[in-house]
Image: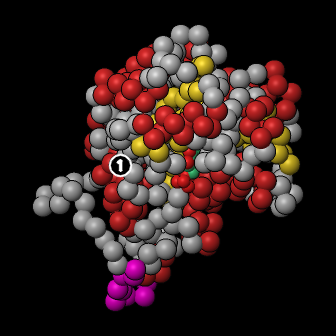
Amino acid sequence: MKPSSRAVHAGRDLKARSPLAPDLSTTAVHVYTDLDDYDAVAKGERPGHYYGRNSNSNREMLEKAVAELEGAEAGLATASGMAALHSAMLALAPRPATIVATRELYGGTMALLRHDFEPAGYEVHFVDLGDLDAVRGAIDGAGLVLAETITNPLCGVPDLEAIAAMARERGVPFLVDNTFASPILCRPLELGATAVMHSATKYIGGHSDLVAGVAVGGAGAIGAARARSVRTGTTLGPFDAWLALRGLRTLDVRMRRHSDNSLALARAMRAMAGVARAHHPLLEGSPSFAVATRLLPQGAGGMMAFDLEGGRSAVQRMMSRLRLVVFAASLGGVETTISYPEITSHRSLTPQERAELGVTPGTVRVSVGIEDADDIIDDFAQALSA
Ligand code: PLP
């Protein structure tokens, strides 16, 4: 099956009289009448569920579906994207090691590395993953390489295929945060990555109504991530799993529309009043254009950014004039939203660190929704006019 069909059907096993849409199983615990049966289920020798922190039918369906879409052996669904990332990182690099991470990491991931990994003895090297020589210089002896398919907020696309080849040659696990692209537009395991994680809060859920994460990869690594997630209690609740799976069913059509709209907006943005620069991986002239064209042939998803002349006050002025588009510090929903990295995703960085990444006081990130592209463009144009 093609990814579009897999998104619709993955993770389910329909038999005669099965409900077509999955039942929501809210129970915390299952009843058993046979000790051997319980023992076999608890050991994983027989299918079934016994306690909600360990497993649940809705969570299991979501895990199987995302694993299938990403082409992975196994999946783990967690209470948030950060929990998926944390479990996956510790599964791949269980003891203090050097982590080579993109310097353009999502701010929450940066905070996790600084406040949790570094104090535990990990050494983190932040590298421009767009510079393959820099990656080559940093990767020898590393315990983990961490990348994002599309960077936040300036939408760069590192050459995941080349980085994966370097990591594999040296036996270094390679973890990719594929949140911005979704498994419809990019499947990093096919490019050679070891494991993939998603904030399912974003495109997989797609409707701004849940918080969830998923990690996928080989059975061994995901088994270790699952064991830790169960021990630390970061597994996903049934209703959020149910919602995320419902969202996943329409992922393909949404990603196509998000991709078309974001490129249309980025192109139109370049001509709008006060816009110094527009950032989109498939925009002619983007530093990532060649890599993005190769790795994201079906589109680059809904994310774009722009730099407004006049800094924070100009951003505030535009925000108060927008009619359709709202400020909301998340992304990946059906509605177009803006975020201001200086006080949202990148607030844990110093002004100098933000400047080094190219995030200015005028940088606005846009999560372009699935409305009509003309309406989105018109709203920004009127908000920025005069
Ligand atoms: N990775 C990326 C790229 C994100 O944008 C986010 C959240 O914004 C996360 C991970 C964390 O996900 P969550 O908020 O679901 O924990």
Which residue was labeled with disc 1?
207
Q: Residue sitting at 63 percent across and 58 percent down? A: 87
Inspect the magenta stretch and tell me whether residue 243 lies in it: no
Q: Main secondary structure of the magenta part?
A: loop
153 in relation to 299, above or below? below
Q: Is residue 41 left or right of residue 96?
A: left
Is residue 299 something one can see in this rendering?
Answer: no
Give the image location of residue 125, x and y in percent: 83, 40
Inspect the magenta stretch and tell me whether residue 34 lies in it: yes
**Is disc 1's CB within 8 Å of ligand 1?**
no
Give the image location of residue 95, x and y in percent: 80, 57
Give the image location of residue 158, x and y in percent: 65, 26
Is residue 125 something one can see in this rendering?
Answer: yes
Amino acid type, label 1: His
Label 1: which secondary element: loop
Q: Nearer the viewer, residue 125 or 260?
A: 260
Residue placed furthest toward the front: 386
